[in-house]
Image (cartoon, rainbow, N blue to C red):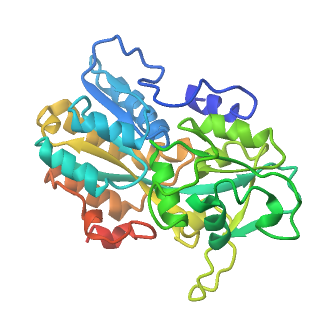
């Protein structure tokens, strides 16, 4: 079994190595490298496995993979410090403008599906579901210092302090969660326990009876024995689904709303003029169906991988997400028509 999967499976038992930018993973960053990748900690495990397989198939080439968060990755991308940016959300209008100002064109490539899990400690016997409205009440900026106890969310829940854990502000997971739940990206209360390292968040919730946190579904799935997921009710009368638990099926069929999302890599068009970078992007898409499930994420349908391959071959630049009022709930087959 791969080293990465062993690490995740033990996340609830081991203390993770700090938060914030990690710079590089276990690969030796001092080694001469051909391709530099950084960004989302959510996309990191997929890229790490793909990079290992690519190196094995291309002796002499090295891929260095870091995980400084989606926002941190895009900052390095704009400065031309990396060839590929991993992202757990679409590029923002501001990041796109910075790319334009720096003369950087990019190819946006969807690579997998993920969901955000809202989790509590298994000793939590009172909560099994929560509504989007209740999550908004809990995480909105105005909740800071005011909504501090469980019974303020539902009166029948205990009169105990609620301890919050969530992605750090440089994370694409943070951006997506706040846009989906609060209604505006990066709009959030500040009095919670943040980390760019999902394993730190897993450990926090797993050891705190009164905790509530959010992070990628993949990390919940890898730690089901020490976590409990809450079903999410988007209160959308049109779909009549009620509260939905996160699963591969509900994420893929988009019934787990509004917390199902696509994952991406962004490749510099200039870097793609180097054959090894273009080959890496093509290898990534061609092998995603095989290796994405190994990381616990959900592969895209074949038709979407075909569109992703076409974007690489034709070097289609820019992001169609920038034309949408919100990326939350967007369906990839419609976005990439």
Quadrant location, the C terminus? bottom left
Q: Is residue 240 depicted above or below 202 in this figure?
A: below
Quadrant location, the N terminus? top right
Q: Is residue 67 depicted above or below 314 in this figure?
A: above
Residues 244 and 4: in front is: 244
Residue in the picture at 41% in, 37% down: 47
The answer to whether 229 appears left or right of 287 in the picture is right
Residue in the picture at 35% in, 55% down: 90
Q: Is residue 111 depicted above or below 84 in this figure?
A: below
**Residue 277 in picture, x, y percent from top left:** 22, 34
Residue in the picture at 51% in, 59% down: 178
Residue at the far bottom in the pictured view: 238
Residue 247: name its quadrant: bottom right
**Residue 78 in picture, x, y percent from top left:** 23, 38
Number of numbered labels in the structure image: 0
The answer to whether 261 appears left or right of 39 in the picture is right
Res 240 visible: yes
The answer to whether 26 appears left or right of 311 in the picture is right
**Residue 243 in picture, x, y percent from top left:** 69, 74
Residue at the far top in the pictured view: 30
**Residue 235 in picture, x, y percent from top left:** 63, 80
Residue 336: name its quadrant: bottom left
Res 247 visible: no
Residue 184: name its quadrant: bottom left
Residue in the picture at 44% in, 33% down: 67
């Amino acid at each position: 079994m791969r080293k990465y999967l062993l690490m995740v499976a033990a996340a609830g038992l081991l203390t993770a190595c700090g938060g914030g930018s990690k710079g590089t993973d276990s690969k030796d960053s001092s080694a001469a490298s051909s391709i530099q990748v950084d960004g989302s900690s959510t996309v990191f495990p997929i890229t790490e496995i793909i990079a290992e397989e690519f190196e094995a198939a291309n002796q002499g080439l090295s891929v260095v993979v870091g995980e400084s968060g989606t926002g941190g990755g895009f900052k390095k991308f704009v400065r031309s410090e990396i060839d590929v940016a991993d992202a757990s959300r679409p590029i923002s209008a501001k990041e796109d403008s910075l790319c334009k100002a720096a003369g950087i064109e990019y190819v946006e490539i969807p690579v997998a599906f993920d969901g955000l899990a809202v989790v509590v400690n298994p000793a939590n016997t009172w909560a099994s579901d929560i509504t989007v409205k209740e999550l908004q009440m809990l995480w909105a900026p105005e909740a800071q210092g005011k909504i501090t106890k469980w019974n303020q969310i539902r009166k029948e829940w205990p009169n105990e302090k609620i301890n919050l854990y969530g992605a750090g502000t440089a994370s694409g997971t943070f951006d997506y969660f706040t846009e989906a739940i609060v209604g505006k990206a990066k709009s959030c209360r500040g009095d919670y326990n943040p980390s760019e390292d999902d394993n730190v968040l897993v450990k926090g919730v797993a050891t705190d009876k009164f905790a509530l946190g959010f992070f990628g579904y993949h990390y919940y799935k890898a730690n089901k024995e020490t976590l409990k997921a809450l079903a999410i009710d988007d209160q959308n009368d049109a779909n009549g689904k009620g509260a939905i638990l996160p699963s591969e099926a509900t994420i893929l069929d988009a019934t787990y709303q509004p917390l199902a999302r696509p994952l991406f890599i962004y490749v510099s068009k200039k870097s793609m003029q180097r054959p090894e970078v273009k080959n890496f992007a093509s290898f990534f898409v061609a092998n995603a169906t095989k290796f994405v499930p190994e990381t616990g994420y959900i592969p895209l349908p074949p038709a979407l991988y075909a569109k992703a391959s076409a974007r690489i071959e034709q070097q289609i630049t820019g992001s169609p997400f920038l034309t949408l009022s919100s990326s939350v709930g967007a369906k990839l087959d419609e976005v990439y028509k």
